[in-house]
Image (spheres, coloured by chain):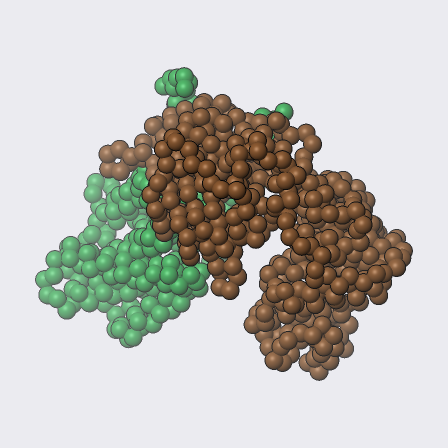
Amino acid sequence: MSTTQTINGPAVLELHNVAKKFGSVVALTSATLTVQPNSIHALVGENGAGKSTVVKIVAGLYQRDGGEFLFRGESVDFGSTAAAKQAGIAVIYQEPTLFPDLSVTENIFMGRQPTGRFGRIDRKAMRDEAKQIFARLAVRIDPDRPADGLSIADQQIIEIAKAISLDARLLIMDEPTAALSGVEVERLFAVARSLRDEGRGLVFISHRFNEVFALCDTITVMRDGAFISTDPIDAVSEDEIVRRMVGRDVTNLFPKQETTVGDELLSVENLTATGLFHDVSFTVRAGEIVALAGLVGAGRSEIARAVFGVDNYESGTVRIGGKRVPKRNPAAAMALGLALVPEDRRKQGLILESSVSRNATLAIRKKLASFGIIRSASENRSARIWADRLRVKTASLDTLAGTLSGGNQQKVVLGKWLATEPRVLIIDEPTRGIDVGTKAEVHRLTSELAGRGMGILMISSELPEVLGMADRVLVVREGRITAEISRAEATAENVMFAATHAEGVAR
Amino acid sequence: MTVVQTPASAIIRGVRAFFGARETGILAALILVIAVTTMVNPTFLFSPDGFRDLLLTPSILVLIAVGQAMVIITRSVDLSVGSVVGLTAYLTGRLFIDVHGIPIILVFVAGILAGAVLGLVNGALVAFGKVPALVITLGTLYAYRGINVLWTGSNRVNASDMPADFLALGTNQLLFIPYLTIIALIVVLIAAWYLRNRRGGRELYAIGSDPAAAQLYGLKVTQRVLVAFIVSGALAGLAGVLFAARYGTSSSQTGTGLELQAVGAAVIGGVAIFGGSGTVYGAAIGAVLLLTINRALPILGIPDFWQQAVVGALILGAIVLDRILALRLSRKLIAKREVSHE
């Protein structure tokens, strides 16, 4: 449970008790990580454990509030991504950020192109070096083509080429394999190993344990913004790692009502949208809370949006109470009794510059209008009912929605959709970013709604929430439902396992 | 690697690039307009005046369009250039009236500097205020024009107020080519060279292509955007001085509407309004095409009130064409990728 010091020079990267706060939200309490040269170091943890914050601090995007940050033995403070890059740190994000209009070569060298007389960019030297790097990586990418239209895998290769061209000593790969096929993963791993053998330090962040165990030599676990353990990979088992990642009491907080499960309300069959999700089938019954669990980016929100009709899909059907819901028609879905409380309430759920009462009645405008005109009095009357029932804490109904706390905003969004008297409610990350007290209230409310016979589909990245609330857990991994687990059988370990474990991945 | 570039293949590549380039289409359209109009009325091209007008008329707009293109490439827009031209044109006249015997070169420097300062104000508001350039420069369009009206009142500068040598710059020519055109050409060449060959130039494209990525790359986004606005302002300032020389007059309304012509020229010339692509050559040819069509339409017997509509159609056509080309290219690139993954 401690960092190991090896003899071959200073560690590439050392973080000791690094802390980071955003306003009142604590993202990191004590992150500790030591990466040796010649090593591929796995960094694992649940969603929200603080891995991304660590990456952004190392990359110079955020500045730490406390703790030590040593790069190649020297204490450093990067004020910008440029400074970190200059020092020799390269970060490869899950979704690479390239300039679509510019050529592959330019993307690799942007900002530090080789120049000759009059500051003229030496295009030939640049192109030759790009070709050399690609040859070394054994990939075939035309250096002159624009970056637009490259596959994610190729884009990552461009990012790696960038790292090589600036001779980065530390490479951080943040979930690089999430969007890759088996062959592409193997190619990436081969590249990673050869970079390691050149004496560089690599950090590999992934939720796929078989990949972690195949590639890495050391593993660090984080939980709730804190360091948990660092071990040689041979010294720990997958089960042990999962336990450390989850490791907390998961039964508090959730006042789950027992309900009688009734008729089938929502049924989704063979829903497919290329690149997002595949062959998704499930049902939600009256009085039932069904959780869609899985990792961020697994495709859960995309499924919800397609079911509600915001986004298109290629094949499959959605039925509510036996009636088919047309594609790409949220109004029709609403008429059939479907409601969607979206993930990003500030962007997709509320009009921040509008009043609470206007927001709360947005989804029932038609019903409130008489002769096409909505009177404030009827708006307020309806809003008042829901504000009271959901215990929205606001000075008045005229308060702008943007000024409410996160929890109260969420209640307003919830009220807006409940006012439509839906039969099936889809809630996407219902308690993200809201305080514990309000969280419990949202949970109580959800449970109560199910008790009254509503069917609820809940998307949540928080395992305790999933385990505490759901009657049934559907686990989504990479756009497919990989497991269906009943409330009785669901445990943190088996849900996490289904969410992270790919069968046919390259070893 | 071992791919040997033979001269022949380089030439073939060059030829292919020429015919594939967005600018070639605009150039072809320009040649077509000139050819058709000349067939209807040969003096359009084959007379000393016709040839001179062909080159002289668009020169001032070319200067402004070059600056505009640089700003649009960074995913901004500079709507204040018309007002900057007005201010600097009047400044030019005032300098000749108020400072007796002022050297002409000093007037140029003053005009360019004044334009640069006005551009700096735009750039600073955009870069530090984090407000879209469309809104900022719409504001400065009116603000600068307001200053101009306040300063000029109902005065106007007349040709008699300015030295003959200066006025000659606006109308005379070197061999067959007007001075104005030579200045515009030099500016186009320098800007094109900078955008293609200098880090700063390439970074303008990068910033326009994906501002968030530019931030992650650690590019000096603020500084570069600032420079683009300063250049746009400075070129508008130069254009203002040349306007005074060419027309021998300036009032409080000089340059009104030029900003839209400049944006139109850039868009017609293939500078994508969302930034990241296009060249100043395109913008320059776009400016020439825009004004040449304006002059050609009366000759072709098209009534006055259709002329604006034709310009509008041209801009819409250019945008639709760009969109189609972009979609086709991205489909082709994706298809290429699918094949390589088989």
**Residue A428 placement: quadrant:** bottom right
Quadrant of image for the C terminus of chain B: top right
Most distant residue in the right direction: A263
Left or right: where B258 falls relative to A27:
left
**Residue B122 placement: quadrant:** bottom left
User: Can residue A79 be seen?
Assistant: yes
- Provide residue A255's location: percent of width, then percent of height: 75, 63
Seen from the viewer's position, the closer of residues A337 and A172 is A172
Quadrant of image for the N terminus of chain B: top left
- Is A255 placed above or below B301 here? below
- Provide residue A95's location: percent of width, then percent of height: 54, 42
- Is A246 placed above or below A37 here? below
- Provide residue B86's location: percent of width, then percent of height: 30, 64
Seen from the viewer's position, the closer of residues B289 and A353 is A353
Left or right: where B302 falls relative to A89:
right
- Provide residue A96's location: percent of width, then percent of height: 51, 41
Seen from the viewer's position, the closer of residues B205 and A419 is A419
What chain is colored brown?
A: A
For the point 40% across and 37% down, which residue is it?
A11
- Tell me what hue chain B is rendered in: green
Left or right: where B57 falls relative to A105:
left
For the point 68% across and 46% down, which residue is it?
A294
For the point 31% across and 40% down, which residue is it?
B198
- Is A47 placed above or below B142 here? above
